[in-house]
Image (cartoon, coloured by chain):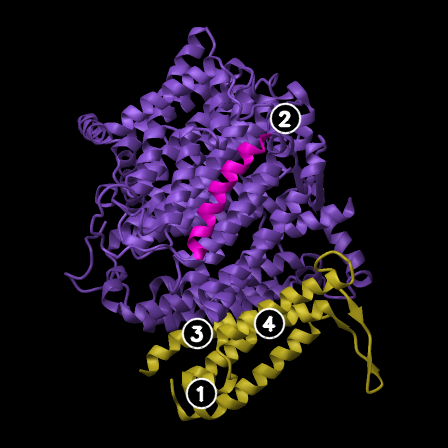
Amino acid sequence: MAGVTALTFAALWLPLLGAVLAPFLVRVLGANAAWLLALAPLLAFAHFASLLPVIAGGEVITGGYAWVPSFDLRFSWLLDGLSLTFALLITGIGTLIVLYSGGYLKGHPDQGRFFSFIFLFMGAMLGLVVSDSLLMLFIFWELTSTTSFLLIGFDHEREAARRAALQALVVTGGGGLLLLAGLLLIWSTTNATDLSTLLQSGDLLRGNPYYLAILILILCGAFTKSAQFPFHFWLPNAMEAPTPVSAYLHSATMVKAGVYLLMRLNPVMGGTPAWETLLPLFGGVTLVVGTLLAIRQTDLKLQLAYTTVSSLGLLVLLTGFGAPYAIEAAALYLMAHSLFKGALFMVAGIIDHETGTRDITRLRGLKAAMPLTFAAALAAAISMGGLPPFFGFLAKEEIYAALAHADPRSIVFTLVAVGGNALMFAVGFAVALKPFLGPVLATPKHPHEAPPLLWVGPVLLALLGLMTAVFSATAHHYISSPTASAIRGSASVLEISLIPHVGLPLLLSALTIALGTLAYWRIDQARLAMATVLRKLGPGPDRGFDYFIVGLIRLSMRVTRFVQPGRLELYITCTFLCLAAILLVPLWLYGEMPTLPVWPRQVQIHEWAIFLLAVLGLFSVVIARDRLTAIVSLGIQGFSVAIIFLLFGAPDLSFTQFMVETLSVVILALVMTRLQLSPTDRRPLGQKMFDGCIAIACGCGFALLLMKATQGPFNNALTEFFNTYSKTIAHGANVVNVIIVDFRGTDTLGEIAVVAITGLAILALIRIRAQTERKLAENDPDAPEGLGVERP
Amino acid sequence: MNTLIFRTITPVLTALMLLFSVFVLLRGHNEPGGGFIGGLIAASALAIFGIARGVGAVRRAIVFHPLAISGAGLLMSCSAGLLSVVFAVPFMTGLWIYPEIAGVEVPLSTVMLFDIGVYLVVVGAITSIALALEEREIE
């Protein structure tokens, strides 16, 4: 078992290794680096495939390493039918996508960076689906959002790509935060930190008083990630990404993360009325909205994107439907969809790459030029349409077997599914047939068959769609049944094969095909009709997102302007007012005023002298004619205080105080000359009185607080501890220094980091100021009229 | 401020102050002193030198950019804390060795390394600010 653990760990790291190596390999080998890079996901695929017989035998593989033992956090994974299927899809399709990207972005100056991003995503997604620890699941979840952001915005010089990337990040990342809240709620109410514990605890979650809150938070996470209505809008916009990304992230893998989460939690959260209402409802609406919007599009990728939205809706619907066969149908459709949609996206990319356009109204008659691509497209479309002998057919039969019952709820959802499937059938064939059949239309580029790097992906996926259906018993044994069992939480065996069973499902299939053919026939009219309807409906959630972002920016601008009007005087006034309030108000409010100290009877003559010197310094600050005198006088006062420290037994403190005072005078004098302030203080009298009051309040506050602190009973436990152990443990006689560098050394480390950063920041400020002297002159209260802003 | 006396005496004064700052730094574990105070003394020394002889002279004298010195100090303090990892004791545990150098037992420790780091951070950060401010006077 130790071997499996180490190998699984290695397989999880392989994509990240690819991410590191990709830029170098691409620099050396160019696009052909794809052949070598594809080995990384291929090896991971081989490892996961080798686990198939064990998992098919009903075993669950868990493993991992301690991460933060004191918090009971582990880097741990859980491999059962569901996560293994996902892992195989991610690494398998990932291998093909790496090859495809090699051809698609051949000669692109940033191809290495692109590969890095793809591999990073692959690593994140793989981690997400195998995670056992809840926190790890969340971290990988957000990593997929982040990498998706990088990939959508890959072409970062285009405004649309940047907007789409940001939108996807805001929607999926925001949903991720809600998911985190849900997971923390699970954690704190059940004490379960990993999925395997949760899955074994049966009704722990369903009986939880916070069940509904947890459910809603998790659904928010899953629905945003899996683009359910009304969060669907980011997915079509994400088509700004290069096509390999659309095929990989936004059809086959990442968008299924939400569905994965729902399937994963089905055994512990499913089956409740809320679950069986919310999931089919949102899934059903998404299915219908997605297909209707897909009809409207003329761009090949957008058509496919909207059908992906509806397919995700269908998966959510099935996961939450609750009838027999529904889970099995979801498992079958999950696989079928990844195969045919991945292939169709790659085909759309090939057409775009070879002809220079993706507009379905401008593409005709490519069959002769691109026979292999056409074959792959046709095979994928047949699977998507649910026709034999492809895997999609099995999925569709199972869906109808699950939905078609006599109760009203089932009838409604059956109608929804039939309508949605019929429209998907029409769109699928429109994408796969229209560009290839008919008379040849002129395209921006002269079309010819794609290079092998491009066609190997779609052809293999399409073939796989056929093979899995023909050898359905094997596919079920190794993949579908273990997946369904994991989703259901108990053993489930699939038997459906290509041999048609006469019955209601077959009838519904026939109806779907008839309706779909009709829609395909009339697709141009349907497109125009939908366009009219959408125009009448007005702006959708996509526009709403823009309003939301603009509003957010305006709000933060307003808040920033309110709290930071840009006048230094105002900041300092506010800071010291707050300081005075913090010092004085609690003392007064809680009646903690100190008793006034008794004036000591015997004051030595030299003590009097020092005291007088301090007061003298203070007065000369106040009456000083120019600023330089005031600064130096402040130094006199500070030195007197330092002498007082020295007299009363704090040599270290006094030592430091001397140095700080000296440097303050030097630096303040430098600052004054540097800022070119006028040498005298020209504040009006009223202002001076006000500022003086604040200063007195702060000073009195500090004095009172210190008096109070020294009047309380003194706990000398720490003093004794340090005196006792300073020499014995830390080998130092100077307790102050030993505390600074040894006992509380970590504090000091933080402090010197602050000192270093402050130095950096001040240097930057001074340098910036040198360049924008005039702009910042507004901060100078003595600036001549016309430059400054109005006085408060 | 640039009197002849000031300009003449500054190099000697700066050298003395720097020497004193190292003395204060090294004796800090047993007598009043330490990295922070030592760093402040050294920073004042460099500031004075800068006022008397110009920023360029200081920059030439200390070779590295003050912030680089500061960063090196931070790295040194951090590493002093991390050294304990090698000996499987918690972060920042003080480690001591007593090698004999020329017949004298010299106590060396990660704590001292840490304090030298503090010294360098303080010197670097404050000198960088002071020099940046002084630079303007020269122009």
Element type at marker 2?
helix
Q: Which of pointers 3 and 2 indicates the residue nearer the eye?
A: 2
The residue labelled by disc 2 is A485
Q: Earlier in the sequence, mark 3 or mark 4?
A: 4
Q: Is residue A579 left or right of residue A561?
A: right
Dot 3: chain letter: B
Mark 4 vs mark 2, CA separation in Å: 64 Å
Q: Which residues are magenta?
A: A452-472
Q: Amino acid at mark 1?
A: Ala
Q: Is A629 placed above or below A68 here? A: below
Q: Which residue is mark 3?
A: B130
Residue A583 visible to the viewer: no
Q: CA distance from mark 3 to mark 2?
A: 71 Å
Which percent across, then down, holds residue A526? 22, 27
Disc 4 is placed on an element classified as helix
Question: Is residue A726 left or right of A278 when viewed as pictured?
Answer: right
